[in-house]
Amino acid sequence: MADDGGEEKKQVAKFELERETELRFEVEAGQTVQLELLTGMAEVFGTELTRNKKFTFDAGAKVAVFTWHGCTVQLSGRTEVAYVSRDTPMLLYLNTHTALEQMRRQAEREDERGPRVMVVGPTDVGKTTVCRLLLNYAVRLGRRPTFVELDVGQGSVSIPGTMGALYIERPADVEEGFSLQAPLVYHFGSTTPGTNIKLYNKITSCLADVFNQRCEVNRRASVSGCVINTCGWVKSSGYQALVHAASAFEVDVVVVLDQERLYNELKRDLPHFVRTVLLPKSGGVVERSKDFRRECRDERIRGQPAEAGAGDAGAGHGAPPAERQHRRQPRRQHLRDQRGRLHRGHRRGPGAPGLHRAVPGPTPPSQELPAHHGHSLHGPQVGEGWDVPPVSSSLCPPLVPTVRCDPGAAPALRFYTFCTICY
């Protein structure tokens, strides 16, 4: 039930959500909308909302507010669309998380590694949002999973044209997404894997090797496992890249969103011990145009990163706004300064990939997750930061760091480059 305010400039609407329902809204162009939880409990993509705190979303943002037990929320501002839906796959996503948590507990008991999950599907099915949900739920139970981003076009770890990994220590911020203080990033040099599929697969293998090295020295990271986000290219060479990624990371579970054909192909080509699960996409997911995707990439390069789940209505938010608020200017200036140091100190040829290394921040106390609906899918910390050796091929001499920024800078950067002749 919604109650619209009478003011023309400042529209206010209250929504009373029943248990296991979802409020989906999109922010109108040139506007901002404030979301406030008045009563009950609710979450945005796995991150709990704080009661009586206002969360601001910019133009183009697409948000889904889900509640397990019922709540009342208020929207202040002009929305392009706002409605309550009872048709949501959240219960299936939570069941998936519960099965993964059972695998983590088994890994703890038997001193083995935790589950490695790869989320696949065509474009605009909410892959990034499912990754964000699984990561948030895991962190709220005290786990420390690793988020691996293989989407070079719409990735959420760094700027477009890169592939990377992020050690998740706290739930994603409702407005800003995951903290990007400690990413490991390889530069691919294009927003399409098909530009150089050999290099794409090579970087995927490098990410897998680095993640394995971290798991060897960090038991908590090993037990927590990883969640891998992939590109929406699922045919021909794109499909082979998915199979290669599954092999490189030795994944245990593959979550296929909204494409039965891809599900059956992976079921056929992957080893029998890899569990392949078919899940539906959220009903609020919308198709993004090429212009919209281009605008997303431009905004990220300008130092205004969109959150995980960008572009999924009812399954993500953080689309590029027409105007940004003054509250984000300090972060924006910091990123510009950081890029300035990079461009002044490091010359890199076109298409030459690099690596970004930083140190993670402090670990916050874990939060409690709502009650599970569990089903199985059968039917002191060591080594802070990323310990990454220089990467080279057998045809090239070992590579050395080309620039090292001031260690006092936040974050500290170290870049390695591939040989552009070999790749």
Image (tube, rainbow, N blue to C red):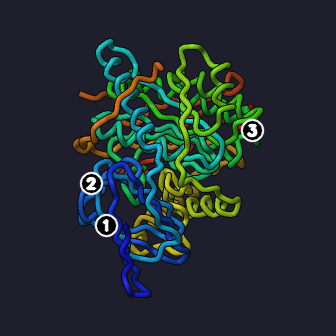
Tag 1: residue type? Glu
Q: Which sits in the foreground, 101 or 73?
A: 73
State whether residue 212 is above or below residue 384.
above
Q: Where is residue 314 shown, x and y percent of the image?
A: 49, 55
From this view, report whether residue 93 is shown above or below residue 5. Answer: above
Q: CA distance from mark 1 to mark 3?
A: 46 Å
Q: In what element is the residue under mark 2?
A: loop
Callout 2 amino acid: Met
Residue hosting label 1: 36
* Residue under pointer 3: 196
Residue position marked by numbered label 2 in the rendering: 41
Question: Would you call the spot at circle 3 few (<14 residues within 10 Å), some (14-19), or many (20 or more)?
Answer: some
Instruction: Indicate the secondary structure of the residue bearing disc 1.
Output: strand
Q: Nearer the viewer, residue 359 or 96?
A: 96
User: Tags 1 and 3 in contact by the CB under 8 Å rule?
Assistant: no
On screen, 324 above or below 357?
A: below
In screen coordinates, is 40 left or right of 324? left
Q: Residue at x 53, y 73 (%)?
A: 28
